[in-house]
Image (tube, rainbow, N blue to C red):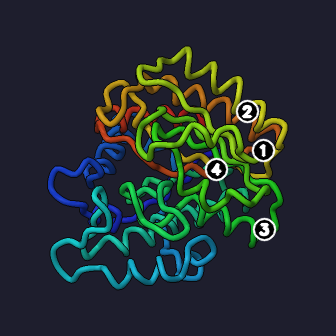
Amino acid sequence: MAITVFSHASCSLHDAGEHHPERPARLSAINDQLIRSGMEYIIQQRDATPATKQDLYRVHDKLHVDTLFELSPSEGYARIDPDTQINRHSITAALHAAGAAINAVDTVMAADNQQAFCAVRPPGHHATRSAAMGFCLFNNIAIAAAYALEKYSLQRIAIVDFDVHHGNGTEDIFQHDARVLLCSTYQDQLYPYVDTAELETLPEHIIKVPLPAGCRSVAWQQQVSQHVLPALDKFAPELIFIAAGFDGHAEDEMSQFLLTEADFAWITTELKALADKHCQGRIVSTLEGGYALSALGRSVVAHLKAML
């Protein structure tokens, strides 16, 4: 059984500006490592189709969506927030990034391949219901999860976000929807600066695991094993989504975590076992962070190998 990898050429045309860490070279680095590792002969690569506005409206306010379309510049850049700006290709790229995740849902639910990965940008997990932020325009994984809930009448979807930054946008969108279990590990006191007081009043379907700067493999794996994996097993999801951010890698300057590609392989192996147990192996993984190019490429390869 192969893994389907969805992407689109437009995702490399989105440009957030010179020296911006979320750059087109990220996808090139992944493709280079897939070729170098021999994974290109194992995966099935497909072009994504774009999400529609109706797909976006399932999780985003109409005003937010329409405003981004209106802000799209004919030349140069339009700034959305201090960290996020777009060029004339960005909206098309974002539509294909969200569309890739929807395509991945259809693929795994049809059992063509039971695992799919979306090599796309811009990322999505910081985009809230009403705002773009943190390099993110539309929330790719939330859009796909809402689509899966509606089209396939699912009642239990799990989203595991191991990006080093908390997926605040995904939490905002699903905070009142107990059909979606969100488990997020992240570096404490790092963007988007989660208020730790909130941890005491979270609903049962939102699990946040803040960890200190300097977190290494053993501590990170212990916390995942203690908080994330048992919750997933109890929830028994019908489909597992992974917000796959690799910016917790020791080589990545966007955080102070000290993880390696072996850690991303480990958590993927654990999630694959739970997917095999509860949902016929069905996993949809979407790229979020990861800005040290070599580490990103190696980590994605490790992630995909662990899904096989």
In primary-sequence order, the first of circles 1 and 4 is 1
Amino acid at dot 1:
Glu
Callout 3 touching callout 4 (CB < 8 Å)? no
**Residue 152, which numbered label?**
3
Q: Relative to 52, is 109 above or below?
A: above
Q: Foreground mark, 3 or 1? A: 1
Residue 179, position as x, y percentages in the image: 79, 57
In primary-sequence order, the first of circles 1 and 2 is 1
Mark 4 packing: few (<14 Cα in 10 Å), some, or many (20+)?
A: many
In primary-sequence order, the first of circles 3 and 4 is 3
| Cα–Cα span, label 1 and label 4 | 18 Å
**Residue 47, which numbered label?**
none
SS at badge 2: helix
* Viewer-closest of 289 and 61: 61
| Cα–Cα span, label 3 and label 4 | 15 Å
SS at badge 1: loop
Q: Which residue is mark 2?
A: 273
Left or right for 106, reference 46: right
| Cα–Cα span, label 3 and label 2 | 23 Å
In primary-sequence order, the first of circles 2 and 4 is 4
Residue at the (67%, 35%) spot, across then down: 271
Q: Which residue is mark 1?
A: 204
Mark 3 packing: few (<14 Cα in 10 Å), some, or many (20+)?
A: few
Residue 61, position as x, y percentages in the image: 55, 77
Q: Which residue is mark 4?
A: 241
